[in-house]
Image (tube, grey):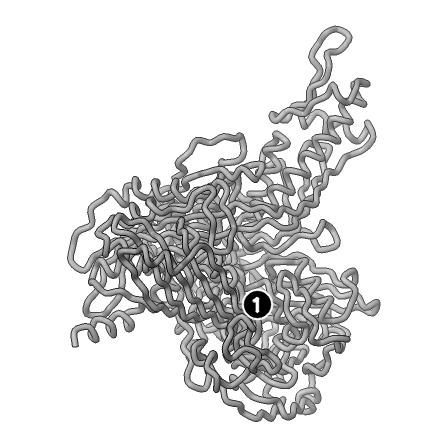
Amino acid sequence: MVTTERRYKVVGTRPIRHDGVDKVTGRAQYGADIRLPGMLYGRMLRSPHAHARIKRIDTSKAAALPGVKAVITAADFPPDEDEERVTNFGPFVVKFRWYRDNLMASDKVLYQGHAVAAVCATDQHIAEDALRLIKVEYELLPLVLDVRDAMLDDAPILQEGVKAPESMGQGADKPSNVNMHIHHEVGDVEAGFGEADVIIEREFETTMVHQGYIELQNGSAFWNKDDEVTIWTSTQGNFGMRDTTAKILQLPVSKVKVSPVEIGGGFGGKIHSYLEPIAALLSKKSGRPVKMYMSRTDVLQGTGPTCGTYDRIKIGAKKDGTIVAAEAYLAYEAGAYMGAPIMPGCMAVFAPYKIPHQRVDGYEVFVNKPRVSAYRAPGAPAAEYASECVIDELAEKLDMDPIELRLQNASVEGTTRADGYKFGIIGNVAVLEAAKNSPHYRSELTGENRGRGVASGFWFNIGQESGAIVAVNADGTVSLSLGSPDIGGTRVAIAMQLAETLGITAQDVKPQIVDTDSVGYTFVTGGSRTAFAGGWAAHEAALDVRRLLEERAAAIWECERADVAYGDDGVIRGPKDEDGKERSFTFKEIAAQLPDTGGRVTGRADTNKTSSGPAFATHIVDVEVDPETGKVEILRYTAVQDPGIAIHPSYVEGQVQGGAAQGIGMALNEEYFYDDEGHLLNSSLLDYRTPTALDLPMIETILAEVPNPGHPYGVRGVGEVPIIPPAPALHAAINNAIGVRMNKLPMSPRAILEKTILAEE
Amino acid sequence: MTTRIVVRATINGEEMEFLADERDSLLEALRERVGLTGTKEGCNDGNCGACSVILDGRLVNSCLVMAAEVNESEITTVEGLARQEELIPLQQTFLEEAALQCGICTPGFLIAAKALLDQNATPSEQEIRYWLAGNLCRCTGYDKIVRAVLRTAAENGS
């Protein structure tokens, strides 16, 4: 359901996506579908230990196996002139050595599943046989798995050379697993709490969880005799992957090309490189193209899930519900190398609220688990789960409706966040009002062990660089070249914005993702930015086309350029002719004349948008808790969100529903189980159980559109914020059903039974 | 060492012979030997359903079937659903209902839903959810997939 009326001809409609037929007929080519002449299969050997020094690797037997064409270890990577330098790998800024060592361990393995060697062979089974012939001698080291344990003085140290941040005061400058400390403060927190009638302080824990994309990580490469490398990989950022691969391989960027393939889900987990430079090195050594793809176990053990966290939240309010002060302590696991989303966590934790006095401290901490990666609104679900649960408890204590409490304290235009950022026009109140007035919230819920919960979420969204090239064809269709991998319908959403600006139909646009040599630099598909920034680039490229066609029309009509105007209806109008008749061209008419009047035209744009449109969401959920088993059944679910303007409402709804489903999985059953030695005990999709069709109801969506004034079509960005409210909404619903506050994720049947049984004893 | 075996099967209505490794699953053989890459690997242990195919009339995970087992069998993969350029109603409805985002699970869902509708032309929402519980989707939350199957059944069911 969209709450506002459609404003545009194309934007707001629901055309069939251009890449749809290929995707329902099996013809779409995803990363692992690549087949190249003479192609070899690459496989990776991974560490069985969570923390160990590598004493010796013997690859001789593997290399001698018939069919094996190359074996590599970390020693095969070209050395960097300064391994300790901090540099960019796609959007990530980290030490060179850390990034390279995560691709393949050199001196130490830091988590189970850490890559140590790779082989390529003529057949995938031979490659697997060869792995078993590689002998690695390890010296086991003490390990640490929990974020709080890792912060203790006597904790085993993962990264030698890392000292506790000075801002931590005591213990600073000692070897430490704390890689980063963030501190935000506004107002006078002590004085703020002094004004409060009610203060609630609670501790929360969340566990490491995986994005769970269905497509396994893959990467294929061919290194030719001119030292040019072509990469085929399912990545969220072709350009970031190109730059990262070039840097690791010590090649000029122009020598590396990422060729586009379809991507089977990412959610933040397919931004980092895991295989591409390795496939390239295997290709260089063997002289043949090499295809690699991971097993599901490798994906769960060796890629980048999101962190487990320990969080403490304190909120104070007056009797009338006015929140006066808030304090957060957030400790996030980085995994083995830098990467915890602590910065956005600290900025987001209280963002839905107008709170005069706030203090936020955040810590990034190394533990012997895989280096964490982005996962849909990275850092926000844990922080906002913690803060939203306290808000819900506050409403209960004050005997207020939880939406009314939120409305009373909602951040609005001009509200300052803990990090000092001041909001522009935002949809927080509109979303809360839409939730309050929704059929779901107004309905009555009755029955034993049933409860309703609500929670809100905030996410930034980002802009960044995007390129677009628009070639006008003589038949009046246009070819649109883009650099953003299309994970969930962004080709159509961007094409629609181009069509709107040109005054043509979405079907007359052919959008395609092209290689990194064929369009301007484009940042990752992530940060809810692709429909926003890609659409903006397409809009600007369309304006370029409009200018070129105005010039051409002026030339054809032999009139002044200034007397020609391209209308939003797609009609170009000029001055009246000698007989006093109106002169005009439709888009198709002028396109047909292009070849004979100077040639076809191409519009282009390279944009770099530093603004963004913050997103807010409120979810409502009804549950029934089975007191015998602890299982939570979701009876009804409604997700309210401000997308700005929904370009293609079906795909906006889809993003909202998918984000809610991932949030529900994170809330109710997903969890990394490690034993004391750091072995992941549930590294399959049977044991790491994501929600199935049977676990979920239909997810009702309400799009409360508050156009972003900072975008030509009002887009804010959609994909990330819906993952945030499910966990705290379910926490509230479970509390309303059985009177138990689950302050640890996941709120699994086991966890609920433990809490209810313990409560009875 | 690898040992190759000859497998004869009818795939998407076409009789063919291919060489498979004796260790190949049907999934590996379809993708890497026959070149039908529409069938996807998501877990290789029968838990995600991305590799669903119809084998002699039964819905199976092709990662759990050995290539050697399918000799003289009839197999339908996602590439065999559309007739020439004409989509079957399920494919068309998936497009109209936006029942796919990244599309990697879509072949498996189409095959599984086809197998369901072949034996139950008018399934309830609950029956659809139960039947499709063996196919994981991480993008959609299943809402639009279930709606697409419901609508296909309503428009084409007996």
Q: Secondary structure at mark 1?
A: loop
The spot of residue A163 in percent (x, y) is 58, 78
In depth, the one of B73 and B102 nearer the eye is: B102
Looking at the rendering, which quadrant does residue A441 occupy? top left
Between A317 and A556, the one nearer to me in the picture: A317
**Does residue A283 appear anywhere in the picture?**
yes
Q: Amino acid at mark 1?
A: Gln
For the question of whether residue A303 can be seen, the reply is no
| Percent coordinates x, y for residue A138 in the rendering | 58, 92
Q: Quadrant location of residue A64?
A: bottom right
As displayed, is residue B114 above or below residue A276?
above
Position of A653 compared to A280: left or right? left
Crowding near pointer 1: few (<14 within 10 Å), some, many (20+)? many
**A354 lies above or below A327:** above
Image quadrant holding the N terminus of chain A, namely: top left
In this rendering, would A614 be left or right of A747? right
- Residue A428, horizontal then vertical, whole percent: 41, 44
**Residue under numbered circle 1:** A217
Quarter of the rendering occupied by the C terminus of chain A? bottom left
Give above or below for A256 relative to A473.
below
Label 1: chain? Answer: A
Q: In the displayed image of the protein, which residue is found farthest to the top?
A: A579
Residue A190 found in image quarter = bottom left
- Figure label count: 1
Q: Position of residue A336 (x, y in %)?
A: 55, 77
* In the image: residue A255, left or right of residue B80: right
